Image (cartoon, rainbow, N blue to C red):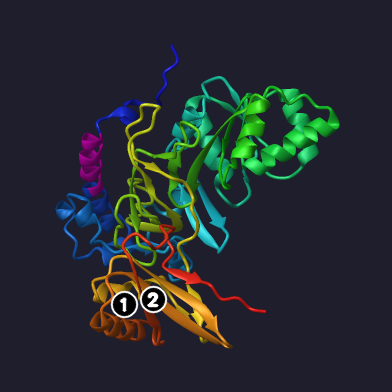
């Protein structure tokens, strides 16, 4: 009988999962301090044995994806393209990738290094099937991420890569793969080209897509053609983060990461149900990223999936967390706004940048009762943090949009 789950980890008790992950996390922090120079320095004063829960984890420093370019430049002379964050030497890796930025990413020798097999399994792929993989194999790791996951299941792969639409249509028509891996938009392009050429692409029954949102209309179109579409969320730094098991029920988190949702520009976790930046700690020993801020916005979905998996779920990609903007010629960062709010004990806030006449203007909206003394303190704190003066507007509890925005640029120019 076909097993519905990839392994027993997916259905374990949530409390047991949390306890086991933090046991592994303490070992991971110890390992990172011993093997990765960056973490040896940044976590020098941290006792791994004290990281027993999420509150303790939240006290550790955040590593931002946006900082990787400069961190990596600093270690090029040492023949280390990874900024001191990797625990394995370059010559002992399977592959080294260069993503846009450029940002360099390692792939170690271990099977299913990126852990995509779990997502492919949830999408319905099984041993003995053939997957037409249209993710790029050139410098970036997406092609390898899906291919190594497919091999771990026991699937053959057509390494199609990107482009060459007509050639890919011919390959699908002749090889008759069981499913597709790639972006949802390119799947639609292939199917439309197949119809134009009169090619039979009916062998495609499964699809695992990523890199773009999956509109309901597109999912419906694919279903009408007999293609069951699932999506996943992965990155070149972290591998698999979340994967869809049931349409429109969110993305179940991978078993080998710990995910936090924090206020954009900070390392402070938000309350459950609030949108914030996705911060991931991976249990990957080769690239032991601790509190890695992805720059993506999302939120936790309450409850458990109807599929029976017990892991927490993300809503999916909800925008970018880096909302840095220029005001009167000066950069204003989400972290600066957060610091001003923190100094005054404000938990929910939003800086709106607008135009008044020909001038930029800032208004810090805060969920708090109107108070002249608090207003004065907020004005002072905002100016101290940003070097710019702004106004304060009080709002009722729950009235600010739950979209993860710390800075809203509302300026309009004629």
Residue 220: image location, x then y, percent: 63, 33
Name the side, left or right, on which 301 lies relative to 145.
Answer: left
Residue 180, by quadrant, is top right
Q: Is residue 210 visible?
A: yes
| Camera-nearest residue between 87 and 386 | 386
Q: Which mark is residue 340?
A: 1
The part of the chain drawn in magenta is: 14-25
Q: Residues within 10 Å of mark 1 (few under 14, many from 20)?
A: many
Name the side, left or right, on which 286 lies relative to 53.
Answer: right
Residue 10: image location, x then y, percent: 34, 30
Label 2 with label 1: CB-CB less than 8 Å: yes
Residue 19 covered by magenta stretch: yes
The residue where tag 2 is placed is 364
Q: Main secondary structure of the magenta part?
A: helix
Label whose residue precedes the other's in the sequence (2 or 1)? 1
Residue beneath the point at 31% across and 30% down: 9
Q: How many marks?
A: 2
- Direction top: furthest residue: 1
Check the image and report above or below for 133 versus 81: above
Image quadrant in which the N terminus is located: top left
| Camera-nearest residue between 324 and 369 | 369
Residue 207 covered by magenta stretch: no
Q: Residues within 10 Å of mark 2 (few under 14, many from 20)?
A: many
Of tags 2 and 1, the one toward the viewer is 2
- Direction right: furthest residue: 197
Q: Element under label 1?
A: helix
Q: CA distance from mark 2 to mark 1?
A: 10 Å
Check the image and report above or below for 200 versus 380: above
Name the side, left or right, on which 262 lies relative to 124.
Answer: left
């Amino acid at each position: 009988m076909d097993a519905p789950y990839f392994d027993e980890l997916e259905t374990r008790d949530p409390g047991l999962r949390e306890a086991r992950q933090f046991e592994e996390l303490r070992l991971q922090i110890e390992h990172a301090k011993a093997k990765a120079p960056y973490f040896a320095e940044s976590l020098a004063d941290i006792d791994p044995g004290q990281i027993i829960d999420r509150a303790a984890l939240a006290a550790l420093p955040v590593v931002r994806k946006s900082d990787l370019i400069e961190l990596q430049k600093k270690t090029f002379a040492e023949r280390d393209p990874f900024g001191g964050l990797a625990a394995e030497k370059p010559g002992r890796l399977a592959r080294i990738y260069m993503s846009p930025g450029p940002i360099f990413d390692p792939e170690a020798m271990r099977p299913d290094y990126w852990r995509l097999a779990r997502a492919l399994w949830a999408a319905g792929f099984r041993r003995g099937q053939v997957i037409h993989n249209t993710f790029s194999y050139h410098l970036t790791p997406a092609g390898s991420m899906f291919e190594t996951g497919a091999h771990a299941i026991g699937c053959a792969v057509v390494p199609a890569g990107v482009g060459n639409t007509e050639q890919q249509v011919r390959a699908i028509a002749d090889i008759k793969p069981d499913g597709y891996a790639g972006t949802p938009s390119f799947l639609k392009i292939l199917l439309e080209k197949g119809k134009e050429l009169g090619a039979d692409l009916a062998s495609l029954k499964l699809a695992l897509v990523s890199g773009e949102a999956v509109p309901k209309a597109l999912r419906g179109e694919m279903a009408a053609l007999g293609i069951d579409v699932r999506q996943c969320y992965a990155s070149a730094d972290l591998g698999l983060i979340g994967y869809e098991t049931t349409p429109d029920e969110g993305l179940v988190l991978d078993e080998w990461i710990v995910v936090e949702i924090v206020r954009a520009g900070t390392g402070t976790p938000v309350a459950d149900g609030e949108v914030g930046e996705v911060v991931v700690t991976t249990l990957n020993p080769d690239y032991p990223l601790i509190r890695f801020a992805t720059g993506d916005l999302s939120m936790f979905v309450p409850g458990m999936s109807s599929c029976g998996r017990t892991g927490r779920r993300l809503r999916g990609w909800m925008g970018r967390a880096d909302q840095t903007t220029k005001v009167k010629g000066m950069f204003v960062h989400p972290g600066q706004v957060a610091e001003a709010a923190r100094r005054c004990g404000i938990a929910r806030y939003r800086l709106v940048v607008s135009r008044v006449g020909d001038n930029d203007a800032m208004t810090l909206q805060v969920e708090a009762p109107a108070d002249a003394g608090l207003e004065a303190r907020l004005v002072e704190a905002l100016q101290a943090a940003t070097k710019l003066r702004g106004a304060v507007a009080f709002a009722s509890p729950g009235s600010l949009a739950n979209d993860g925005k710390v800075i809203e640029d509302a300026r309009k120019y004629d």
